Amino acid sequence: MKILSNRVQKIKPSATLSITAKANELKAKGIPIIPMGSGEPDFDTPQNIKQAAIKAIGDGKTKYTAVDGTNDLKNAIIDKFKNNNNLQYSSSQVMVSSGGKQVFYNLCQAILDDEDEVIIPSPYWVSYPDMVILAGAKPVFVKTELEQNFKITAKQLENSITDKTKLVVINSPSNPTGVIYSKDELKSLASVLKNYPKIFVISDDIYEYIRWNNEDFSNIAMVDNDLKDRTIILNGVSKAYAMTGWRIGYCAGNEDIIKSMKKIQGQSTSNPCSIAQEAALEALSADQSIIKTMVTEFKKRHDFIVDSLNTIDGIECPISQGAFYSFPRVKGLIQRLGFKDDLELSAYCLEKLNIALVPGTAFGAQNYIRLSFATSMENIEKTIDKFSSI
């Protein structure tokens, strides 16, 4: 008897969560594992944010909120977009969800039909394709390599568009590569998309504040106002404020689309956690210096890991511009050690070197690995020592 739906059998478990789970299993057996796989800042949530949550509990803010978030939090998000991105939105164009992942999921469910196509540059965040598939649509991958800084070109975008294309995904700063699209690069992509008025864009800006390039942050709606009404901007508090477990993401965009996403959320999770919303309000409204402190440390770790990995035979580690990942090409190392691919190398790293990392194949890029430096310098140094010994 068939038990599972065709839908669920088409998707695969999150590779990053699977690696973390496997590492936790080994740790439970007493094996010390170096955590280089998880995209979770090792910093604690700032004290003022935690206190805001505690106060919310004391004040009895423990009831349902509006499905799309509290008015206070939505107003703070509107102010954020206005002050930091020069983008104007009304309350009906903004909504809050249980993490950035739910924003993407809601969008796919709201606008995609069977056979619609979604253009996803590769390497990509592991959950994009499966959420597209869950909506009955088809992910269309556009391959990029280290030599082009892992960024899709206007020509590649143009060549990937068909009459079935409904959505284009842009993630900058990127997970897993850490690269950032410049204003000129975004304008180039925008010049293509303006010729296709039925195509929407999701701009995943979750790592907006974690960057060390010399250019101010931009997304495609900021560089070309003609695309603003066709762009849904995804963001959240998880990465910038070390609030991964609080599960608050948010988005802004076309009012009709946001209303449809609200309907999806209303029939699935309903409102995000009321206490976490109060914490997110504090995060967005209070002093922002904690971000600079974390970014300074991430940049220090980045520089060390890039310089160190590039001294190891068989590893090519590019410079990142943001997020907290390095995405080295390890084809030479795979060949030198006699492995078949990055999957075998990653299994070896976990089982023999006790390093938890994610194979590039999980992100649609063979012969690469993703190393997260959202962990301590001590862990990074141990990782480099182990790689240097093989």
Image: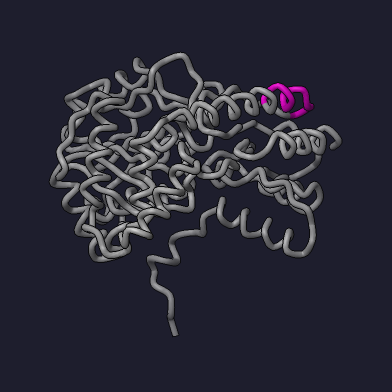
Determine if the magenta segment contains residue 64.
Answer: no
- Please indicate whether residue 251 sits to the left or right of residue 1 in the image: left
**Quarter occupied by residue 89:** top left
- Please indicate whether residue 322 sits to the left or right of residue 68 in the image: right
Position in image of residue 71 (x %, y %): 20, 48
Task: Using the rendered image of the protein, determine whether residue 370 is visible from the camera's viewpoint.
Answer: no
> Looking at this view, is 229 or 63 the one in front?
63
Determine if the magenta segment contains residue 310.
Answer: yes
Q: Report the quarter where the C terminus lies.
A: top right
The residue under the point 51% across, 59% down is 13
**Quarter occupied by residue 153:** top left
> Looking at this view, is 72 or 368 the one in front?
72
Position in image of residue 41 (x %, y %): 56, 41
The residue under the point 73% across, 46% down is 34
Q: Is residue 101 above or below residue 271?
A: above
Give the residue at the far bottom of this rendering. Answer: 1
Position in image of residue 171 (x %, y %): 40, 34
Provide the residue span drawn in magenta.
306-314
